[in-house]
Amino acid sequence: MRALRILVIVAVILGALSVVADRVAVGFAEDEVADQLKTSEGLTTTPEVSINGFPFLTQVATGELDDVEVGIKDFEAGTGNADESIRIDDLKANMRGVAFSSDYSSATAASATGTATIAYDELLTAAKSEPTDVGLGFTARVVGLSDGGKGKIKVAVEIDPPALEPQTVSVLSTVSVKGDTVEVQADSLPSLGGADVAENVVRSITDFQQAIDNLPGGIKLDKVEAAPDGVEITVKGSNVELAG
């Protein structure tokens, strides 16, 4: 009985040590992947990387990780204009089937899905915020974006009629994704103080779009919806490069 107790104690100790070794190894790997991702994407801060699944060392032996989560607080995405960028907040991506090199210098995920947020003040830069002549002495401009409820964006338009005080009207707009572009289109058009202005002229103010490209690893826009703090986007991709 004493020998059996000793064997049980030894087994428990070895098991605990193997768990500790596994967690140390996964911590090292997470740090390495995070550093590589920071370098490859030119990030200003180190992203959060979590390698899920246990045991980690068994996954390492196969050369592929089942599930890796990546979190980037602020990411400067491209807009199609080399001189401009747009800030993406809280980009979180879940990577599946991540194949990696032995030194973690390269890692590619078979598939990826994720979410992020574009703040309304960021998206506002794509709208016509400068007064624009819409004819008959009227000027108009977009002065604010906010959550309109039920997945809609509320677009505030300031109208400045001749010889009268400016007034602000709001329209509910649908937000959608077309390729690498977020599009905002008014469901109905505001009245410009009774003036007979062509629809295409009014829509040149209320409707706008924002290109978003160069997302990490080549992931792409998938869906978009208005939310309290901004526009929530979902992203997806295949053969996504985490590093290398």
Image (cartoon, rainbow, N blue to C red):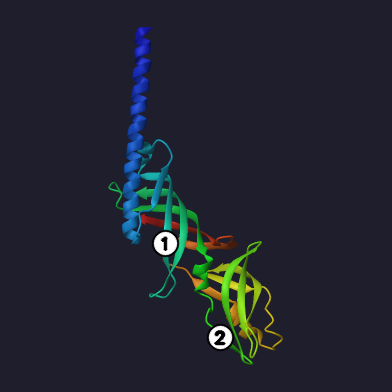
Disc 1: which residue:
75
Residue 31 position (above or below residue 162): above
Q: What's the residue type where badge 2 is placed? A: Thr
Q: Is residue 180 visible?
A: no
Name the foreground residue: 58 vs 41.
41
The relative height of residue 202 versus residue 222 in the rendered view (above or below) is: below
Which element type, helix, strand or loop, lies under badge 2?
Answer: strand
Q: Quadrant of residue 57?
A: top left
Residue farthest toward the left in the current orientation of the protein: 103
* Residue drawn where x is 33% and y is 59% of the image: 40
Q: Quadrant of the N terminus?
A: top left
Q: Position of residue 196 (x, y in %)?
A: 70, 89
The x and y percentages for residue 68 are 42, 47
> Residue at the right extreme?
194
- Residue 94 position, x and y percent, is 46, 51
Q: Position of residue 160 (x, y in %)?
A: 61, 85
Identified by mark 1, the residue type is Phe
For the point 41% across and 45% down, the residue is 50
The secondary structure type at the circle numbered 1 is strand
* CA distance for labels 2 and 1: 31 Å
Number of marks drawn: 2
Q: Earlier in the sequence, mark 2 or mark 1?
A: 1
Q: Which quadrant holds the C terminus?
A: bottom left
Q: Is residue 7 left or right of residue 173?
A: left
Q: Which mark is residue 132?
A: 2
The residue drawn where x is 41% and y is 75% is 81
Q: Which residue is drawn at the image coordinates 53% and 76% (left, top)?
A: 127
